[in-house]
Image: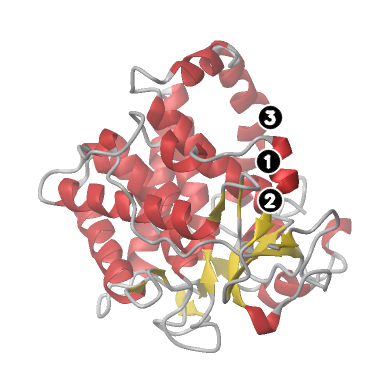
Amino acid sequence: MHDLSGAGEGGDESQGDVLDVPDERDAEPAPWLGGGGHEGSLAWFVGAGTPSRAAARASCYPGDEREMVMTSSVRAARAAWVSTLALVLSAASPRGTLAHEAARDLPSGERWKEHLEKDLLPFWTVPDALGTPRGNFPTYRCNDGRLIDPERPCPEAQDPRGLVKEGLEEQYVRMMGRQAYFYGVAYHLLGDPALLELARDGVDYLRRHALSPGTGSAATRLRDGEPAGPPDLERTAQDLAYAQVGMAMYYYLTRDPEVLRDIVRLKHHIFENYWDEGFGMMRWTVRGEDRERKELVAQLDQVNAYLLLLTPILPEPERGQWKADLVRLAGVLRRRFFSPREHLFFGRWVPRTAKSLGGATTTSGTPPRPCG
């Protein structure tokens, strides 16, 4: 079934490596955001201190009271996201030689258009993809694009499990936002007004049904057009970030002031409630059983869902405030989740008592050795 795993991403990974890293919280200002910093671009945040392979083999972990879990199922994807972020930003710098070299190897514009028109759009423009009313995008469909018929399910839907089995009657707001984002990107590439109208319909539906006028939060799931799932402040920071993604792309294309008002309100809710000075990072949730979790994606997905896209085009004072938040989150990513020795980003912080080397949370390979 198409993209079924995406509805619950970032949640319950169980395989990872446990390593100790220094607890360094404060990030130097990034020069691309008007600060000081080092080496001319945010790439310094991501790649600084990378050891040689020989040095990595000889390294040890310091044995302090903090540990991190590297999630094997997401570590490469997440590191790629952050590295891509650094690469894009470094392209604006005189030192962005690597970015310019990589750009020469990208497919041509015509090849991107062909991929979109032939490989992607057919699945996302069949009638069942558009929802009833239009913009009420379904989360689950068959591989041929049809809605799932519970009485006669397509083969790939005959044995649903986990989140899919529990949520076939619901829609994930993050998936609806991503679909609106897709139509916005497709319009940006092809210039077809019908695609922008689909993005608008998706954004309008989410603004009417998923956003809370009382708190500024956003629902995690919808059932029959009403919020479902966890209550306010038990929703994850990642789900709230992806509630923004469709609106962010639509504002990027249209500069609709009403949409921006909702984006800013939701962003304010996230940073006011989920940023924790004691943690030195965004919380995963504010309340509930997961409130002590420290997740990389609680920070990272604020960046890639809306902050990076919108900050350069915002009016003041939002632009300056959002720049400062990007610097703050870049510092968290590098200082709290990046291991220079391993040249990897780690998915989750955990207490030492919960995980141990060689246990269920370590991947195969040679673990770091204790110092001395």
Q: Are marks 2 and 1 in contact (CB under 8 Å)?
A: yes
Q: Quadrant of the C terminus?
A: bottom right
Q: Quadrant of the N terminus?
A: bottom right
Where residue 239 sits: x, y (%)?
A: 48, 66
Give the residue number, with chain letter if any, for mark 2: 59
Left or right: 192 with respect to 108?
Answer: left
- Label 2 or label 3, whichever comes before in sequence order: 2
Where residue 246 sits: x, y (%)?
A: 41, 50
Q: Amino acid at mark 3?
A: Asp
Looking at the picture, tell me which residue is in the foreground, 271 or 66: 66
Q: Height in image: 217 above or below 259?
A: below
On residue 55, the disc is 1
Q: Height in image: 351 above or below 168?
A: below
Query: Which of the two marks, 2 or 3, is nearer to us in this view?
Result: 2
Left or right: 257 with respect to 325?
Answer: left
Distance of label 2 from label 1 (alpha carbons): 6 Å
Give the residue number, with chain letter if any, for mark 3: 119
On residue 246, the disc is none
Left or right: 96 with respect to 12?
Answer: left
Q: Amino acid at mark 2?
A: Ser
Distance of label 3 from label 1 (alpha carbons): 44 Å
